[in-house]
Amino acid sequence: MIDQNHAAALTAILGDKGIVTGGGDVASYQTGARYDEGRAAIVLRPQTTKEVSAAVSYCVRNGIAVIPQSGNTGLVSGSTPDLTGAQAVLSLDRMTKRFDLDLNNRSLRADAGFRLSDVNQKLEKHRLFFPIDLGADPRLGGMLATNTGGSRFLKYGDVRRNTLGIKVVLADEEGTILDLTSDLRKNNTGIDWKQVFIGTSGAFGIITECVVNLEPLPKQVATAYLVPASGAHVMPLLRAMEDRLGAYLSAFEGISKNAVTAALDHVPSLKNPFQGGNVPDYVILAEISRTWEPREGEQSLDAVLEAVLAEIWESDAAPLADAFVGPAHEMWSLRHALSEGVKHSGKLIAFDLSFRRGDIMAFCDRMKADMPQAFPEVTICDFGHIGDGGVHFNLVVPKDSASASDADFERRLRDWVFAIAVQDFNGSFSAEHAIGRKNQAYYDLYTQQKIKDMAQGLKVITSPGDLGAVRFG
């Protein structure tokens, strides 16, 4: 789907292994993690920043649009080509050479193609990890480009908070390499330019290398399932946990009954942890952690958690209806199975929303009340990072329903949910998945024109070539 002269020129730049032009090998690069599928003119697989620069330079000079792709685990069609067959996919999957660990600085300088699992496996022997916990296994470049958050945002923050520096290739005729790979944690000598490229989906440049903060790997962990007395008691329960546990609290994940049921149905090997197999309407997965080995005479974390829960249970207007401490691996296994479980229960229409923490349960209650009248076929299977205000608001339509394949139905549903989330609750339509084709219309609708004009100005300055799936201007 690309002129053979262009294919030959790009092969000369990247080598035979750096090009994919057809057949089954292309499929994985043009098929996304959630229903989206396009047609790539060619797939470029550079190994170094210089090769990225040369390939991007050629594409810009010849009018070839480029879609940067990292692990291709995104959920908003931000890393796959459209259906025109005219866009080149530039994959980072071969950029896995540089891996420089600085133990004194507690930082890592690495190529952007490393997967999160590979990074943490290499760091484990040093008792360190990159503290972004995700159900998927993305590559570093994509994590920075979308500013991922994850289940332990409450304690460690998002990727933006944990990034010290980057190297980026601009989509201009020169394929300019911008070296922002500072190892410094404090540097107030001007504009923090790396932030232009973090969380903006590759529209302003392709991140090829990064310097990230590392954290000590927890050596003690305790987890519990908490059943709040009601939805209105979720926030009082969170505040009570924060007051009593401080920095120990590393996760506070809310899960609806429908989401738990979908996971248990999809993964029969999962243990149903609830008494009599009766799943509560809403449950919280709470985790506390320490980074040091147990000391003689020190109260275990399980005992700490049990004592705190007892205090909360006995407090006035106790927000807790039930709780039990259990093995961390079992409890997190259920949490990590939620996405796939929900996905396999029907046609999934997913939303990645965020709110002020105090508005999360009010929004969910509003949806549960209004959804049956507005869209009676839809089942709500929500879960999310209650501790940081994030909600994966997943809606499932029966597979045999005509609505499951009705694009107009999905558009009306998205319009309705986003209008309530953004306009009525002052929330965000994209908490941690960034912007892709699936939510381009909502960026256009809800973003102030002056901000769009400023973004377009940055685009012209940084990468005037046709780069990325999203348009910020």
Image (cartoon, grey):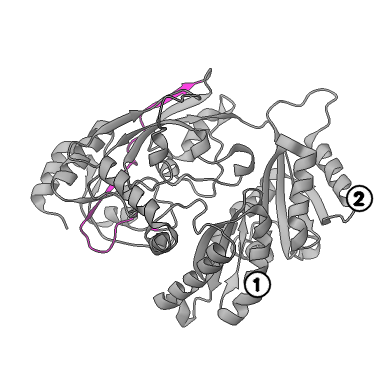
- The residue beneath circle 1 is 368
Mark 1 surroundings: few (<14), some (14-19) or many (≥20) residues within 10 A: few
Q: What residue is drawn where x is 42% and y is 41%?
A: 198
Is there any visible trace of residue 45 in the rendered image?
no
Is there any visible trace of residue 374 in the rendered image?
yes
Residue 219: x percent and y percent?
Answer: 68, 30
Q: Is residue 233 left or right of residue 417?
A: right
Q: What residue is drawn where x is 64% and y is 57%?
A: 269
The amino acid type, in three-letter code, at marker 1 is Lys
Q: Quadrant of residue 356?
A: bottom right
Give the extent of the magenta segment.
77-102
Magenta stretch containing residue 275, yes or no? no
Q: What residue is drawn where x is 32% and y is 38%?
A: 94
Quadrant showing the C terminus: bottom left
Give the label on residue 78, or none.
none
Residue 129 lies, with reference to residue 23, above or below; the image says: above
Mark 2 surroundings: few (<14), some (14-19) or many (≥20) residues within 10 A: few
Q: Quadrant of residue 435?
A: bottom left
